[in-house]
Amino acid sequence: MLIGKKSTIGVDIGSRYLKVAQVDAGKDGYELSLFSMLPIERDVIGDGLVLNKTKLVDSLKALMSQAGIKKAEAVLGLSGHSAVITKVIKVPLITEEELGLNIKYEAEQYIPFDIKDVNIDFEILGPDTEEEGMMDVMLVAVKKTVMADYVDAVQQAGITPVVVDVDSFAVGNVYEVNYGIADKKNVALVNIGASKTNINILRKGLPVFMRDTAIGSNYHTEAIERTLNISRDAAERVKLGETVEGVPHDSVRDIINGASDEIYAEIYRSFEYFRSSIGDEDINGIVLSGGAALIKGFSTLMSERLGIPVEVADVLKNIRKSDKLALGEVAPITAVAVGLAMRRSGDRQ
């Protein structure tokens, strides 16, 4: 479907890093031809909101320069529980055109914002398996002001936004290409960044539950910084297994595990909400991506605490990598950027 179409770049704007990726599609499948990332200051992005647009623009320009990109069409990803609402709803079985005319009326009962203040999109998932004459629809609503801030920032940085997507959908794109579609399993795609966690539960390859929470790997960093009285930078390095003078690894491991338990508890609450809202269904496996996947022992402890098998996402399982790229062990943090880069100009926004 994407063969012959011009490649876009995927721009993942997180609270700790900016990331950009380019994925080329051809007869032999996908190839990751570019990936670059750049740290940003803590006061630029918070809970999915742009807090300092000037700094964001400057950082985006620096990232494009670092990546060797002068002009590009881009796909942006958004997430955050205060700005983006995603929900599977049931509506009468009608055509896509008819739903498009009525979606605002259907959405009003599910959106906690004034309907005039949000951009709404939807995707028909298929007929409802439990109720005849109804169908399941993925509803997405994003605050107009939030989207405008991101779009304006990337435009000021010289980037042309052509599609705005949701981070959880981007991770879903990567999962489908690399793992295919499980016929019967419920698989939870859990992407844990610095300040938020995206959860996307798939049933037979289709999203049936999505939730963003304002908790992420900053919990680890802040706990280390606070307990050991070291700098933020040193805490970040220690978190990822680097040696810092005067900091014993055993004490760090206990701190990390304690912070991890808080993250697992929040994920568990989301899973319980899924079970109660969908019908007490089991989650058969977790595919973990994001910065937390780089923390030694995090995925193993996650499996023990939640009682569910956990696999660190193999982002490049079925995606070739350019010989010019040396991602090493950081591949799990590329998931959102790579998934965004798989979209193309002209895709439904």
Image (cartoon, rainbow, N blue to C red):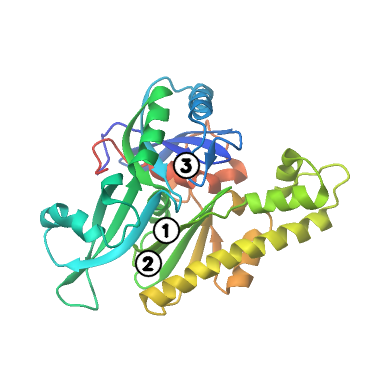
Tell me what residue is drawn at x 33 percent, y 41 percent: 144
- Residue 344: where, in percent of width, then height? 30, 38
Callout 3–callout 1 Cβ contact below 8 Å:
no
Q: Which residue is mark 3?
A: 49
Q: Amino acid at mark 1?
A: Tyr
**Residue drawn at the location 38% of the way across and 74% of the way down:** 277
Marks 1/2: CA–CA distance: 8 Å
Name the disc covering residue 179, or none. 1
Q: Earlier in the sequence, mark 2 or mark 3?
A: 3
Q: Residues within 10 Å of mark 2 (few under 14, many from 20)?
A: some
Q: Nearer the viewer, mark 3 or mark 1?
A: 3
Q: Is residue 93 left or right of residue 84?
A: left
Q: Are marks 1 and 2 in contact (CB under 8 Å)?
A: yes
Task: Reply above or below: 255 against 231.
Answer: below
Q: Secondary structure at mark 1?
A: helix
Q: Check disc 3 and report its element: helix, strand or loop.
A: strand
Instruction: Locate the N terminus and report the quarter of the image it occupies.
Output: top left
Give how far apart the Cα atoms at labels 2 and 3 are: 34 Å
The answer to whether 174 is drawn above or below residue 180 in the figure is above
Where residue 73 sits, quadrant-wise, is top left
Of residues 214 and 21, which is closer to you in this image?
Answer: 214
Spatial distance from mark 3 to mark 1, Cα to Cα?
32 Å
Q: Which residue is mark 2?
A: 182
Say whether residue 113 is left or right of residue 42. left
